[in-house]
Amino acid sequence: MSQIHRAVAIDGPAASGKSTVARRLAASLGLIMVNSGAMYRAVTWQILQDGVDPSDADAVIRALEGMEIGCGIEDGLSTIAIKGRHLTTEVREPQVNDAVSKVASIPEVRERLVEMQREYLTDNDVVMEGRDIGSVVFPDSPFKLYIDASEEVRAARRSKDGEADAVAKRDAQDRQRKASPLKISEGAIVIDSSHLTIDEVVGEAREALIKLGWDD
Ligand code: CDP
């Protein structure tokens, strides 16, 4: 891992507001923002396109072997392409929501994507959001945040966005899996966003970073 660049790790459950906060924080600190969930979603989308059963780990691993995955940065935000196709809104389709936690529980999938996630730090200071960023991807970073919200608030936010997404089920799968489960990393500052506006969460996140030693 690079010693020169800094990583802000933001973890938390589905629809806790991490992505919005990560994007705003990255913009205000002049860092790039990497959405690691989009990478798990992109692999899942491709697997479904290929007609592979997401519950069949061996078949997923075989499909992953030949899969060309391209990670980039555009306007300060991470991008993801598979087989040369840039994936955006398709990764938020309901069938991806349903299958992504299964695919993300496969250690071989995680290994490949974690390696690509760490590469972002070689040339950039990053805010990266996901489930295992503080615990596995950048465990040595002192800048760890965990954004939470009550289950009711999170389910309501997702349905307000018009998305069919069983957040409680996905969270249970993400917390119970053996490989890099969702948890609060040691040293992370927890922010409960249930009753806060986005501006308030971003403000708390900035204060938390200063407490953790961020100095600009
Ligand atoms: O929809 P939401 O933004 O809450 O989730 P996401 O960040 O897009 O992540 C989608 C799924 O990818 C999660 O439910 C996890 O199963 C998986 N994921 C993971 O395992 N590790 C990460 N670092 C990020 C996402």
Image: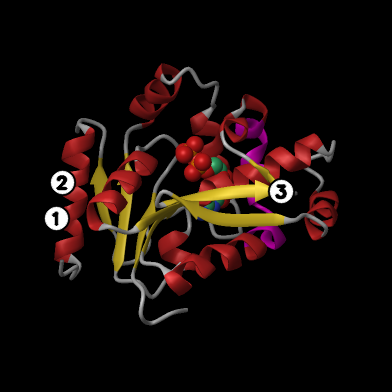
Circles 2, 3 touching at the beta carbon (< 8 Å): no
Residue on which the image places disc 2: 203
Which contiguous range is marked in magenta?
Answer: 96-110
Please rate how many residues cluster around mark 3, counting C-alpha atoms within 10 Å: few if below 14, some from 14 to 19, many from 20: few
- Which badge, 3 or 1, is on the more N-terminal residue? 3
Looking at this view, is 107 or 141 the one in front? 141
Tell me what residue is drawn at x 41 percent, y 34 percent. Answer: 15
Expressed as whole percent of the image width and height from the top left, the position of residue 107 reads 67, 61
Amino acid at circle 3: Gly
The quarter of the picture where residue 188 lies is bottom left
- Which badge, 2 or 3, is on the more N-terminal residue? 3
Amino acid at circle 1: Glu
Secondary element under disc 3, as helix, strand or loop, is loop
Amino acid at circle 2: Gly
Q: How many marks?
A: 3
Query: Label 3, label 1: how many angstroms apart (C-alpha)?
Result: 40 Å
Asked if ligand 1 lies within 8 A of label 2, the reply is no
Residue on which the image places disc 3: 84
Q: Image height check: is 3 above or below 97?
A: below
Residue 35 magenta-highlighted: no
Query: Label 1, label 2: how many angstroms apart (C-alpha)?
Result: 6 Å
Query: Label 2, label 3: how many angstroms apart (C-alpha)?
Result: 38 Å
Residue farthest toward the front in the current orientation of the protein? 75
Residue on which the image places disc 1: 207
Please rate how many residues cluster around mark 2, counting C-alpha atoms within 10 Å: few if below 14, some from 14 to 19, many from 20: few
